[in-house]
Image (tube, helix red, strand yellow):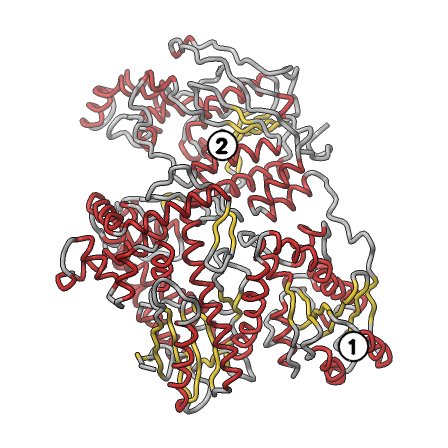
């Protein structure tokens, strides 16, 4: 059966292949070791495809290409995700008859016996990649893809062996690898596959790129060398000359034999002097095609799988989209609708509305949802209301609909619903209630009685999950797949508005959106109680919803004329920088092209390539910052990127986001995104405007009070994370410094350097500040040295002195990690919980990602708890005392208000009282206050 004919199914697979002990290799020309198969070897592979993944090559590729990712339990998973995604892609798109993953096994190989310097320059595996290797093995084991390896040999040798056997059995073999050594394996039946480019690399491609045949690859590499594996070539013989020599003489032996005829005295001398070294290099580069590796052909057929285990593993890792893909691959039907199919009723006449209202008035709890014309609540117009108060029935009230379909009058419907919606005695349930609350407020209704938000509850139970949508929660807890919005309105340029969809379809969708939170509530409430998160939910997160409604509804006024001025100026600056960059490069180039930047920086200018990605040397900001010390061009590139990003993201985008009626930008503040408990901002993201740069300050100058005679007040927790660290650690010196309100960075600098406070230099303070913040995130000597521009040894001494001077901090960090390893989770000051895996038994000062995540969650999450508590307290007092003031923004540890000028000091006093007194800590909480005519020009004030 061809791959296209058979339905794909994933296999189960018991163990990795087992290999016999390593054998002594005879001379290169005498190798005759046969492979040792497990189970029956196929009689023929004719018309069948065998795909072999060079596992470590792909793992390193995705590890360096993808941004840092963590699972819901805080363990690093970027490489696991990338590798699994690629594996599922192969299964879905290539439909192999056989699939294997070849791994390098620990220990030396036979090549180390040939040359003990082989691969000696290879760097150690990155700390955050190490735990991911074991997880990748768990993934492929669950998927049933055989992992193949053999002691004393490399994965490339395994690829070579499987390729040989496949060819002997008349099959076609595709080697998924980026390793150029494998080009020697190319035949008519064996080809390489570049998964990043979705390209097959064959004889013709090899000839086009290197100008040689597969039989000449090892000779070519022996001449050129491979510095990555510490394989010496022949000095002065580059790829171009190696190609010409092999095209002329055919083999390495013939090239060396005719060395005296090579042009150029130095090249001729180099060939004569290093000929034997080239032959040795070829021995290292030639892949062994007869490895005694165990090949389980039955497992490689992909005939069955442990799909439940794979799905559970994907859930643990947070791979939601990959779990859906796995379901499709395995032919599993999508989750089914709810067992007892609900009735979704349409209420489109005044009589039907009155009948529904009679029922609503009798309820103690209702679930609600709204269909609208926009995802931005302040811009949204209501299309329909949906309600549910029992788990088998929901009602949809259309107020906008396609022409010809009956609907209710919007104003009359709002007036009729007002008494129920504004009654605090009637509990309100929903998914993302904040959105509905703002929509209703825009319609003149102040929602009361908000009691349960399924999105917030789901987030608290599993903060590491990347998605807490109703569809995800329904799948997770009800095993139900929801109606997708795309099924109603489509996507892209053909997307409809919701009021253009037939009412019957909208009613089913909207009714489900109201019904599911009602069904989820008892499940989630029980789970919150089981993990002692019910108090956090009811006393902090649900009350916070009302505060966020206030912030988003208020918005903040933006001076569009100021932004237009900045847009013109930034455009001029960008043009000037572009010209400077071209001059420094020596020629024009496309600055947005990573490939052209790589050519200029690393080939033409010869700057060191410190990191690589799937497309070559990295040109990201971190790399450019390092290179800026060596050449002026990288600094100009960074400046150019900053201006272009700020211009497109804020200066030009913000005017388009100003509400036509309010004249304000109404950003969203999300309490279900960050795993630490911090709020995030979107549409627009106001938390990413640079704080310390001149351009950032210029953009902030466009944020102004909304009324004449009003000013902005900024209230910022001073060094809140360090104060939380002092509270938890109880370190006497750190607590004493905060108690005296000293300059904490100067105090630490004096302590670490052994000098009095008055003799602390700016450089000492800068180093101490870097350690104070870096210590929370597990920064080691290398990172500190890089950030401060000092030697690694000096940075290491500074860190050692720091922990010796503040022993309570190190004890706290050790305690957090020990408890996390024992319980599997960490907790914040208010009991917020996050599951984390991957903490090592004896974690040192330089921590891996899971360990950094654990400490960061405790410290940063506790700071997030405190400012949320303060926001609730301030909101309630503003309501109670009726000050002419509004809370507008929360930017991490900072709150922004607008206030009538004559009430500034009243507001300042109120804010300080609530923020500083929000919770009793071992150290005082300090609040810095600034006020002014715009966000940039706020100055220190005294309350």
Q: Residue 801's spot in the image, x, y percent?
A: 22, 48
Using the image, determine if residue 255 lies above or below residue 241. above
Helix, strand or loop at disc 1? loop
Badge number at residue 361:
1
Using the image, determine if residue 422 lies above or below residue 849. below
Badge number at residue 870:
none
* Residue at 24% over, 21% down: 274
Horizontal side of 476 relative to 532 (left or right) equals right
- How many residues crowd mark 1 within 10 Å: few (<14), some (14–19), many (20+)? few
Using the image, determine if residue 225 lies above or below residue 615. above
Q: Residue 453's spot in the image, x, y percent?
A: 64, 64
- How many residues crowd mark 2 within 10 Å: few (<14), some (14–19), many (20+)? many
* Residue at 29% over, 66% down: 739
Residue 504 appears in view: yes
Quarter of the rendering occupied by the N terminus? top right
Horizontal side of 62 relative to 173 (left or right) equals left
Q: Nearer the viewer, residue 55 or 894?
A: 894
Q: Nearer the viewer, residue 907 or 136?
A: 907
Q: Residue 367's spot in the image, x, y percent?
A: 72, 68
* Residue at 85% over, 77% down: 355
Q: Sequence order check: which comes first, mark 1 or mark 2? A: 2
């Amino acid at each position: 059966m061809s791959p296209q004919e058979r339905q794909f199914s994933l296999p189960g697979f018991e163990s990795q292949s087992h290999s016999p002990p390593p054998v002594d290799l005879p001379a290169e020309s005498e190798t005759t070791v046969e492979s040792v198969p497990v189970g029956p070897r196929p009689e023929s592979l004719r018309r069948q495809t065998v795909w072999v993944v060079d596992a470590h090559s792909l793992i390193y590729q995705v590890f360096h290409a993808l941004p840092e990712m963590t699972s819901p339990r805080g363990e690093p998973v970027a490489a696991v995700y990338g590798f699994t995604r690629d594996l599922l892609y192969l299964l879905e798109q290539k439909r192999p008859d056989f699939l294997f993953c070849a791994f390098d096994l620990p220990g030396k190989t036979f090549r180390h016996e040939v040359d003990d310097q082989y691969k000696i320059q290879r760097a150690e595996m990155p700390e955050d990649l190490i735990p991911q290797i074991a997880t990748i093995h768990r993934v492929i084991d669950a998927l049933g893809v055989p992992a193949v390896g053999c002691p004393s040999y490399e994965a490339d040798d395994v690829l070579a062996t499987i390729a040989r056997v496949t060819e002997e059995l008349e099959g076609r073999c595709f080697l998924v690898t980026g390793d150029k050594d494998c080009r020697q394996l190319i035949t008519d039946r064996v080809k390489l596959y570049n998964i990043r480019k979705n390209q097959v690399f064959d004889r013709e491609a090899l000839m086009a790129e290197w100008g040689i045949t597969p039989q000449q690859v090892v000779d070519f590499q022996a001449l050129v060398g491979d510095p990555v594996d510490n394989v010496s070539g022949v000095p002065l013989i580059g790829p171009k000359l190696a190609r010409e020599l092999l095209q002329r003489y055919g083999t390495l032996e013939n090239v060396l034999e005719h060395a005296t005829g090579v042009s150029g005295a130095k090249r001729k001398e180099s060939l004569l002097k290093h000929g034997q070294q080239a032959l040795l290099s070829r021995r290292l580069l030639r892949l062994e095609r007869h490895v005694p590796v165990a090949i389980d052909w039955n497992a490689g057929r992909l005939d069955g799988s442990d799909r439940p285990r794979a799905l559970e593993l994907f859930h643990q890792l947070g791979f939601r989209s990959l779990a859906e893909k796995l379901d499709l691959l395995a032919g599993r039907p999508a989750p089914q609708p709810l067992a007892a199919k609900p009735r979704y009723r349409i209420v489109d006449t005044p009589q039907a509305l009155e009948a529904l209202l009679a029922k609503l008035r009798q309820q103690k709890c209702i679930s609600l949802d709204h269909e609208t014309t926009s995802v931005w609540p302040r811009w949204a117009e209501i299309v329909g209301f949906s309600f549910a108060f029992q788990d088998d029935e929901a009602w949809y009230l259309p107020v906008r609909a396609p022409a010809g379909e009956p609907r209710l009058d919007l104003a009359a419907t709002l007036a009729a619903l007002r008494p129920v919606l504004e009654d605090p005695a009637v509990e309100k349930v929903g998914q993302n209630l904040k959105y509905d609350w703002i929509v209703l407020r825009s319609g003149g209704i102040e929602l009361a009685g908000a009691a349960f938000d399924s999105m917030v509850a789901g987030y608290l139970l599993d903060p590491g999950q990347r998605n807490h949508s109703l569809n995800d929660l329904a799948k997770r807890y009800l095993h139900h797949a929801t109606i997708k919005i795309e099924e109603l309105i489509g996507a892209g340029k053909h997307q409809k508005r919701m009021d253009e969809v037939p009412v019957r379809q909208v009613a089913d969708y909207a009714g489900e959106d109201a019904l599911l939170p009602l069904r989820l509530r008892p499940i989630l409430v029980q789970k919150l109680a089981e993990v002692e998160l019910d108090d956090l939910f009811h006393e902090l997160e649900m009350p916070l919803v009302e505060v966020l409604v206030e912030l988003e509804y208020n918005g903040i006024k933006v001076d569009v004329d100021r932004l237009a001025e900045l847009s013109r100026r930034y455009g001029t600056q960008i043009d000037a920088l572009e010209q400077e960059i071209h001059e420094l490069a020596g020629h024009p180039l496309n600055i947005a092209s990573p490939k052209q930047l790589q050519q200029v920086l690393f080939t033409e200018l010869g700057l060191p390539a410190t990191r690589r990605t799937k497309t070559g040397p990295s040109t990201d900001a971190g790399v450019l910052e390092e290179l800026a010390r060596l050449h002026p061009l990288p600094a100009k590139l960074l400046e150019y990127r900053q201006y272009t990003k700020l211009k497109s993201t804020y200066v030009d985008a913000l005017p388009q986001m100003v509400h036509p009626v309010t004249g304000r930008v109404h950003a969203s503040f999300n309490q279900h995104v960050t795993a630490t408990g911090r709020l995030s901002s979107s549409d627009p993201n106001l938390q990413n405007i640079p704080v310390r740069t001149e351009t950032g300050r210029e953009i902030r100058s466009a944020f102004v009070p909304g009324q004449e005679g009003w000013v902005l007040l900024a209230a910022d927790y001073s060094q809140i994370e360090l104060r939380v660290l002092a509270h938890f650690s109880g370190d006497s010196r750190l607590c004493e410094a905060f108690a005296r309100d000293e300059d904490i960075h100067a105090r630490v600098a004096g302590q670490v350097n052994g000098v009095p406070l008055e003799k602390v230099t700016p450089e000492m303070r800068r180093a101490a500040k870097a350690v104070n913040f870096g210590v929370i995130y597990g920064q080691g000597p290398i990172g500190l040295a890089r950030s401060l521009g000092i030697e690694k040894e000096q940075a290491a001494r500074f860190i050692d002195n720091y922990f010796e001077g503040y022993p309570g901090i190190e004890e706290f960090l050790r305690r957090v990690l020990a408890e996390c390893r024992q319980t599997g989770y960490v907790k914040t000051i208010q009991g917020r919980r996050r599951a984390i895996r991957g903490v090592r038994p004896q974690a040192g000062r330089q921590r891996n990602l899971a360990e950094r995540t654990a400490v960061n969650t405790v410290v940063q999450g506790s700071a997030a708890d405190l400012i949320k508590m303060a926001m609730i307290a301030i909101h309630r007092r503003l309501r109670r005392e009726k000050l002419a003031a509004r809370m507008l923004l929360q930017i991490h540890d900072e709150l922004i208000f607008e206030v009538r000028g004559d009430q500034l000091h009243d507001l300042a006093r109120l804010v300080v009282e609530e923020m500083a007194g929000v919770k009793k800590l071992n150290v005082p909480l300090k609040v810095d206050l600034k006020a002014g005519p715009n966000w940039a020009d706020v100055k220190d004030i005294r309350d």
